[in-house]
Amino acid sequence: MLEKLIELEKCALQELESVENLDSLEKFRVTYLGKKGMVLSAMKALRELPAQERPKAGQLANQIKDQLLKRFEEKRESLGSKNSRAPAFLDVTLSGREPARGRFHPITQVLEEICHIFERMGFRIVKGPNVELDYYNFEALNIPKDHPARDMQDTFYISDNVVLRTQTSPMQVRVMENQPPPVSIISPGKVYRRDSDVSHTPMFHQVEGLLVDKGITLGDLKGTLTAFVHQMFGRDTGLRFRPSFFPFTEPSAEVDIQCVICLGKGCRTCSNTGWLEILGSGMVDPEVYRFVGYDSEIYSGFAFGLGIERIAMLKYGIDDIQHFFKNDMRFLRQF
């Protein structure tokens, strides 16, 4: 039995010397030092020896076990430090490579800036579905079926009564249905229309705003939008309100700002007028209140809507809206 133990130790040490990686080392541990390994099996066999031989054989078996455990730990530390070294193919003389850094898309940057401006004024951000019911997208905004205003917002139909929303204004109705006045919200998001040219795309981003309370006047609308324009484009930027028409506001107004390219002198960008249109606005039509159960004799309010891409084009002097969607990194890295 003593000779068998010595031979077992010799074979184990020889095999341990040939181990070159941690996987092979683990196999060695299971074979020799595991619960069903050869060392423990040999120690259990000592029970069959005569009583006078057991002490000496047991002492030798324990010495072999301790020796193999010690050599096993030394081998594991050696292989661990070896694997932690830099791989042989690494050329430490090469200059470092800076990790690629992501950045926000210019549309996202402008959208967040607009939201922050209105949040500081006390407006709450709400978001809604891109796929909208015809009722919320048109009818509840005072645009009944066969109304000529629908031609201006020709869109993509999922079914006769379900559309890809043409504006984020449906959230105004959804919020007023579930909340009594006062209401002060902005609703940013994607909208869809069948347009495609240098200044329009079938999908674009919009922010709609709504404020309803007692005693709200056109002066509140003008003051709010004037503050927004000055924070977005600078305090020296001039703006004007022009009469217009929107089915869900009355009176309605387009808002123009002084051309940011020629500073009002007249150029190709502003068609030599010195002015650029940036958004539509107006006082909420009392007919809209009828859909949400508000009393138009007590409450009044204003609404406005602006396109994010248009604001970004004016802010950064971009002449083609399609640059935003071509994923050209030479363009996007400028922002």
Image (spheres, rainbow, N blue to C red):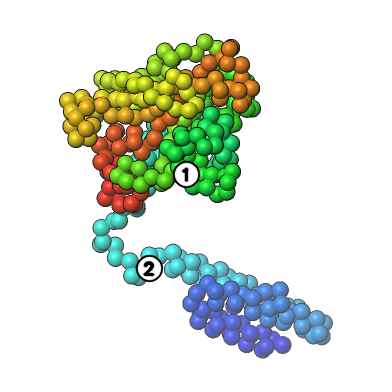
Q: Nearer the viewer, mark 2 or mark 1?
A: 1
Q: Is residue 192 above or below residue 125?
A: below
Q: Quadrant of residue 27?
A: bottom right
Q: Position of residue 299 (x, y in %)?
A: 56, 14
Tell me which amino acid carries mark 1: Thr
Q: Which residue is mark 1?
A: 155
Residue type, mark 2 in image: Pro
- Residue 142 lies, in percent from the top left, at 53, 29
How busy is the neighbourhood of tag 1: few (under 14 within 10 Å), some, or many (20 plus)?
some
* Front position in the image: 207 or 57: 207
Instruction: Reply above or below: 91 against 127.
Output: below
- The label on residue 187 is none
Q: Quadrant of the C terminus?
A: top left
**Of callouts 2 and 1, which one flags the residue occurring earlier in the amino acid sequence?**
2
Give the residue drawn at x 30%, y 21%: 239
In percent of width and height, residue 230 lies at: 32, 22
Q: Which label belongs to residue 87?
A: 2
Residue at horizontal 34%, vertical 36%? 310
Q: Residue at x 38, y 36 (%)?
A: 308
Helix, strand, or loop for circle 1?
loop
In the foreground, 230 or 97: 230
**Residue 261 x %, y %:** 21, 31
Residue in the image at 29% along x and 34% along y: 314
Is disc 2 surrounded by few (<14), some (14 to 19) or many (20+) residues within 10 Å? Answer: few
Q: Is residue 123 visible?
A: no
Q: Mark 2 to mark 1: distance in Å?
A: 58 Å
| Rendered-image quadrant of the N terminus | bottom right
SS at mark 2? Answer: loop
Residue 272 visible, this angle = yes
Q: Is residue 102 left or right of residue 237?
A: right
Circle 2/circle 1 CB separation < 8 Å: no
